[in-house]
Image (tube, rainbow, N blue to C red):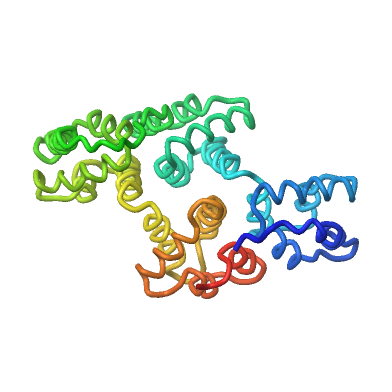
């Protein structure tokens, strides 16, 4: 739960964040997980004025492991965090397609525009060029279509004729023919508004014996399939998509920490409470309890701090 800024706590925090002999991890967790990004930046400025050094550098020196990863993530805006995760997924040898797909296929048009701008500011590189240089084929074409942010804004007017045309076009380009006209799928799924696509997928079932997710599974494979599935799942219920991802990351012993961290940090100021609600409704157990069962130590504490009090 994000709390209101209490400037009176700054001196205490400044002194306790990195004591000469020991690090007060609990204070760091308590203060930073219960503030917004804007408030954390104010704390960083106050720290710098009082301690005469950069707070992020101090945190890097004071913390390590999973706790450090989460806390440093919280010191970035949502767009900065997403841009940094994308950059990390494509620089160096190999590509982390899982991260690339999750972020580019789940973010709104507005979010993607901001990510592109921040990416340019942080890394002095063009996101489109970097994605094009690190992917290939129809997978690259889909991601580039999303990065180009051509998606229509939602309209107050429901165009039933266009809904029917798009539903029919998706069917004609896939299940109805041998092979798949991927270009048509990319065009419709990257250019239409989300409310429009939700209605298209409902209408699609009157043409196809399979729903849209089933059609994707039948028609395409590999990274392209995974990308289309993330798109369709997010169009239908984005918070349920993230709840399912968190469940998959913590369904066996331990946790896939990279995925858990990425989702909770990137969504903590967007829709984390709704994700928690979807998780409880879908799995009959709170995300809070699942984190308790599959994580430990300071990493567990910082995640629980971001989740807030269990409702």
Q: What residue lies at 90% left-to-right and 61% top-to-bottom? A: 20
Q: Along the horizontal axis of the image, is 297 left or right of 235? A: right
Residue 101 position by quadrant: top left
Q: Residue 215: image x %, image y %? A: 19, 46
Q: How many marks?
A: 0
Q: Residue 143: image x %, image y %? A: 39, 33
Q: Along the horizontal axis of the image, is 55 left or right of 67? A: right
Residue at the far front in the pictured view: 156
Q: Along the horizontal axis of the image, is 294 left or right of 216? A: right
Could you tell me if residue 78 is visible in this image?
yes
Q: Residue 96: image x %, image y %? A: 48, 43
Could you tell me if residue 17 is visible in this image?
no
Of residues 93 and 121, the one nearer the viewer is 121
Residue 282 position by quadrant: bottom left
Q: Look at the picture and state if 205 lies above or below 181.
A: below
Q: Look at the picture and state if 308 lies above or below 105.
A: below
Of residues 277 and 246, the one nearer the viewer is 277
Q: Along the horizontal axis of the image, is 33 left or right of 189? A: right
Residue 292 position by quadrant: bottom right
Q: Quadrant of the N terminus?
A: bottom right
Q: Residue 141: image x %, image y %? A: 35, 29
Q: What residue lies at 65% left-to-right and 45% top-to-bottom? A: 76
Q: Look at the picture and state if 91 lies above or below 241.
A: above
Q: Look at the picture and state if 44 lies above or below 178.
A: below
Q: What residue lies at 73% left-to-right and 68% top-to-bottom? A: 26
Of residues 122 and 131, the one nearer the viewer is 122
Q: What residue lies at 49% left-to-right and 32% top-to-bottom? A: 113
């Amino acid at each position: 739960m994000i709390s209101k800024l209490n400037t009176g706590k700054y001196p205490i925090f400044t002194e306790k964040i990195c004591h000469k002999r020991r690090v007060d991890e609990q204070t760091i967790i308590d203060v930073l997980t219960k503030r917004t990004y804007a408030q954390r930046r104010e704390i960083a400025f106050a720290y710098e004025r009082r301690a005469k050094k950069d707070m992020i550098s101090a945190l890097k020196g004071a913390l390590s492991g999973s706790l450090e990863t989460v806390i440093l993530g919280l010191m970035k805006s949502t767009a900065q965090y997403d841009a940094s995760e994308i950059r990390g997924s494509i620089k160096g040898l190999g590509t982390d397609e899982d991260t690339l797909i999750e972020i580019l296929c789940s973010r709104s048009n507005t979010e993607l525009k901001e990510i592109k701008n921040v990416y340019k500011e942080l890394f002095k590189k063009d996101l489109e060029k970097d994605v094009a240089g690190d992917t290939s084929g129809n997978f690259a074409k889909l991601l580039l279509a999303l990065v180009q942010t051509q998606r229509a804004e939602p309209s107050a007017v429901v165009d039933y004729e266009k809904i029917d045309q798009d539903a029919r076009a998706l069917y004609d380009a896939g299940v109805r023919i041998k092979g798949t006209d991927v270009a048509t799928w990319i065009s419709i799924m990257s250019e239409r508004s989300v409310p429009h696509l939700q209605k298209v997928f409902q209408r699609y079932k009157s043409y196809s014996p399979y729903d849209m997710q089933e059609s994707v599974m039948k028609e395409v494979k590999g990274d392209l399939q995974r990308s289309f599935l993330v798109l369709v799942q997010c169009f239908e219920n984005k918070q349920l998509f993230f709840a399912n991802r968190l469940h998959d990351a913590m369904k066996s012993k331990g946790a896939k920490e990279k995925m858990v961290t990425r989702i909770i940090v990137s969504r903590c100021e967007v829709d984390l409470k709704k994700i928690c609600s979807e998780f409880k409704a879908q799995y009959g157990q709170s995300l809070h309890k699942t984190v308790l069962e599959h994580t430990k130590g300071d990493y567990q504490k910082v995640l629980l701090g971001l989740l807030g009090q269990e409702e």
